[in-house]
Image: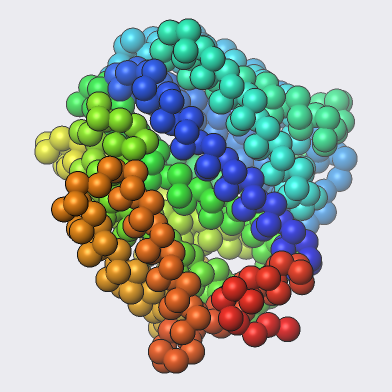
Amino acid sequence: MTRRVSNGLLWMYLSSGLSGLLQLPLLAVLARLVAPAEFGLVTASLVVLTFGTLFAQAGLDTALVQRRELGEDHVRAAYGASLLLATTMALTVFAAAPVLARIVGLPDASPLIRALSVVLLIEGLTLGPALLLRDLRFRAIAVLDLVGFVFGYGAVAVVLALRGWGAAALIAGRIGQAVVSTVGHWIVRPHTLRPSLAPRPLGELLRVGGGELLARLLGTFGTQADSLVVGRWLGASALGFYGRAYRLMELPTTLFTQAIRKVLFPVLATMQDDRARLGRTYLTGLGVLTAVTLPVCLVLALVAEEVVLTLLGPDWRGLVPVFRILVLAMLFRASPSLSDSLILACGAVYRQAARIAFFALLVTTGALVGQRWGVTGVAVGVLVAMGGNYLAMALLSLRLTGLGWAAFWRVQRSGVQLAAAVLATAYPTVVGMRAAAAPPIVVVLLAAFVAGGTELAVVRLAPRIGALGELVVLTRRLLELVPQAARIRVARVLAIRVS
């Protein structure tokens, strides 16, 4: 199991890392070819697609992974339900596109929503993603995700944007991604083509899937409520700025959250009856996440203006304050992904749904109150809501594992100290470079270099700094999931003794 986890983490980190690196130049190119208002229309359309996807899947993908014993009858029932739900939702979204566009406050998004309805039908043709996850075939998942993004979305969107398609180029890219991903999953993980709606296996899947659907609906509403508020009350241009700022905040955390969800969920499901092991795994992951994400979010907040100017150009300068606020929520966004994997593995989907309803209420309230002060006010409201969600997810995770708050805060102490050390060196560096009128990209690169060097130095000196020695313990535990050859190389760099 350790070997499978280590291989899974490496492949998912590789896929997420490459995807993140590719998204940066892609975002930079598209931001110069597509106007903010058109980005706003696409963002609103994707909100509709997200909700449609939830109903089309009905939580059956999670039920397939979580179930201890999965028979052919369960796969056939899930496939039959998938085809029925996907077709129904595609037709519904297509027919109701004008109404849905008015609900999000952007009537001009109607043609884009209709075009995206085909994605629901395409993605409903395979159960491959869930079955690969259940089989712990992380290398295949990583490769398919990367291929779908690069050849499906990236290539199509850029080519059509260069031809002046505007918002339609981004929609076509999303459709292309669905086609490439579905074909790839059929090749790598084929399954029965005999759909069924047999009541017994379908009912067994829906007992978990129904709770997961409820949780996802509430969670999606929580994560999309801010976009709905911005689009409806502040307009397409404001939504374009807000959507790009949120996306920039998401990119660094994607490396961690996607790998955590896809790898730890099926692995934790195998140990769902061992609370002690679940607790140890949760605390180790939490400590590592804090040590990694907190320094990054502080440095990004420090160089927010230079990041925006480098990636998006001067036309997007207006999103700098929004990005600076949202990026502070990186830890609040990354940590719940670990809790989410734990909660799903334990099958506590209805308890999770109640927690997500609380989060949705927080985001909606924060966005509605904050919109009085524009997109910056919405960003502040969302930051507060994510902080509340961070604590609520932690509370549920601690109850499931039998842990206390003291252990929760103690394991994150080293990450906070590391972030303070990084900020102490990066801040004067950035101030000095600005005073010297250095180009934005130079400021960003030098800040990253100084921050990275500080982190490496602190980890090497950690045993001599008292509490920071916990970083070494966490790093050792993390290295235990890495194959021996790579483990030795990393340990030599960090000057950490491992077995």
Residue 60 in the image: state x and y as whole percent: 67, 40
Towards the viewer: 193 or 84: 193
Residue 489 in the image: state x and y as whole percent: 68, 70
The colour mode here is rainbow
Q: Quadrant of residue 268?
A: bottom right
Q: Is residue 359 left or right of residue 8?
A: left
Q: Is residue 87 left or right of residue 78?
A: left
Q: Is residue 321 visible?
A: yes
Q: Residue at x 65, y 85 (%)?
A: 497
Q: Is residue 486 above or below residue 21?
A: below
Q: Which residue sits furthest left?
A: 373
Residue 29 in the image: state x and y as whole percent: 43, 25
Q: Residue at x 68, y 32 (%)?
A: 147
Q: Quadrant of residue 319?
A: top left
Q: Looking at the image, how many numbered discs can be counted on the residues? A: 0
Q: Is residue 105 above or below residue 270?
A: above
Image quadrant occupied by the N terminus: bottom right
Residue 164 in the image: state x and y as whole percent: 43, 8
Q: Is residue 39 left or right of residue 463?
A: left
Q: Residue at x 58, y 62 (%)?
A: 342
